[in-house]
Amino acid sequence: MQVSPKLEVIDLACERGDHRLFSGLGFTLSGGELMQVQGENGKGKTTLLRALCGFVQPVAGAVHWCGRNVEEWDEDFHAQTCYLGHLNAIKDELSALENLLLTAGLADVQLGEKAALDALRRMGLRRKEHLPVRVLSQGQRRRVALSRLLVVDAALWILDEPLTALDVGAVDLMQELIGEHLSNGGMTIFTTHQPLHVAGIQTRELMLS
Amino acid sequence: MTSRLSVFGLLGLVIKRDLLLAMRRRADVLTTLIFFVMVVSLFPLGVGPEPDMLRKMAGGVLWVAALLSSMLSLPRMFSADHIDGTLEQMMLAPQSLTVMVLGKIVAHWMLSGLPLVLIAPVLGLQFDMSAEAIWVLMLALLLGTPVLSMIGAVGAALTLGLRGGGVLVSLLVLPLTIPVLIFGAGAVEAVSGGMDAASNLSLLGAFLLFALVFSPFVASQALRISME
């Protein structure tokens, strides 16, 4: 992890089809900061997060990481981000444990089976570790997906509706995890339509309209 | 930060992953193989059981059937990973997407091409092929079916997420596989006619090397375009 990671969004503009979602968007996010992207449905929240990941090419502007354009960072930028989208990115045929080990492998993280089991148990999946994910409920699948955050050592968390399908206990756990991540010098940018408060942290708000 | 996982480590991981997934869903692998056997078996029934004619058309029939059955599994190459979001995560991984795509191609070939190579001798007997012709057929399939997976990967990546992508990918890819068909079937025909198959096999080998160099890169670029 970098000493003081910093994400800068400079004059960003994105389109979907021929429709301009937002333009002239700029902000800076430093280590320890939490930012919530707000806006009505269809205002470009997901597009903004996907643009940060590099899935969407912005029509104008740039995203900088620690002072350098993310296009120059390329794969090294990906090593420092963890993106969780609407899709859980887990395989129905595999167990929660197999899913987590594979995810870690592809993300180039050395992960032992014990550490993986610990992460799943922390996410409240005790005794579900070896079941095929297809027999788990929507909330439990989301927990499997979120367990990725525990094993990947990324400075920047990009979370698109992380609380979907989660129960009250899991929402509390998420708030706790984000709190720990921030106090370790990480940063988080997220969207949600549910309240999410991290103790002792002022959530910065970014309104897309 | 440099990558700790070597190219071969990553390649092995992706291949292992896809094989594991296939083992949990064996029906997909079997459909390709059964389709191949059925199409090939229909020809003797359709054109009549004259050994001379069967021997003459064996190479062509087996190759066309191999082409068609390899098309069956192409749409699945990336779409399952696309639908559940794992493809997104692969693209975000701090690793070379080209290497991951190559891994997926190799796994696809092991599941759709290799079984055809292994069952081809049995089907060759149906056509009264000589032992030598069967060997050449296997060798030609061994060189040619990976090319089908590689060209197919580019088509599958380009049509990812499109409606009716399954048919479209066949329409896109089949014309591009004609050279493989010509030289693959040509090798078998040459041996049956008492000639040497070396030139045909060398050309198939050249196609393989050419596809190996370009297709993983082109397919990974096509995936990036499809993801937008």
Image: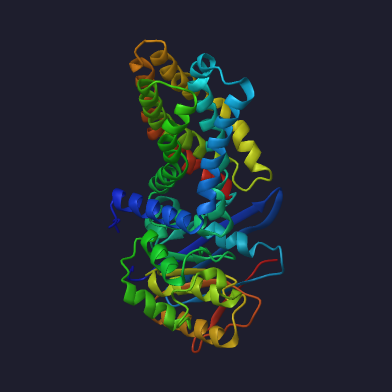
Judging from the image, the colouring scheme is rainbow
Up/down of A146 relative to B137, above or below: below
Q: Which residue is drawn at the image coordinates 48% and 59% (left, top)? A: B24
Residue B171 x, y percent position in the rendering: 62, 32
Residue at 59% from the left image edge and 56% from the top image edge: B83
* Viewer-nearest residue: A106 or A73: A106
**From the image, which quarter does the N terminus of chain B lie in?**
bottom left
Q: Residue at x 56, y 68 (%)?
A: A134
Residue A96 visible in image: yes
Residue under the image location 33 percent in, 51 percent down: B12
Relative to B10, A159 lies left or right: right
How many numbered circles does the render carry? 0
The spot of residue B213 in percent (x, y) is 38, 33
Q: Furthest-top residue in view?
A: B194
- Residue A54 showing in the rendered view: no
| Residue A150, x across and y down, in percent | 41, 75
Residue B131 location (% of width, % of height): 36, 23
- On the rendered structure, is A23 left or right of B61? right
Res B199 quadrant in image: top left
Above or below B48: residue B84? below
- Whether residue A184 sits left or right of residue B177 in the image: it is left
Q: Nearer the viewer, residue B132 or B97?
A: B132
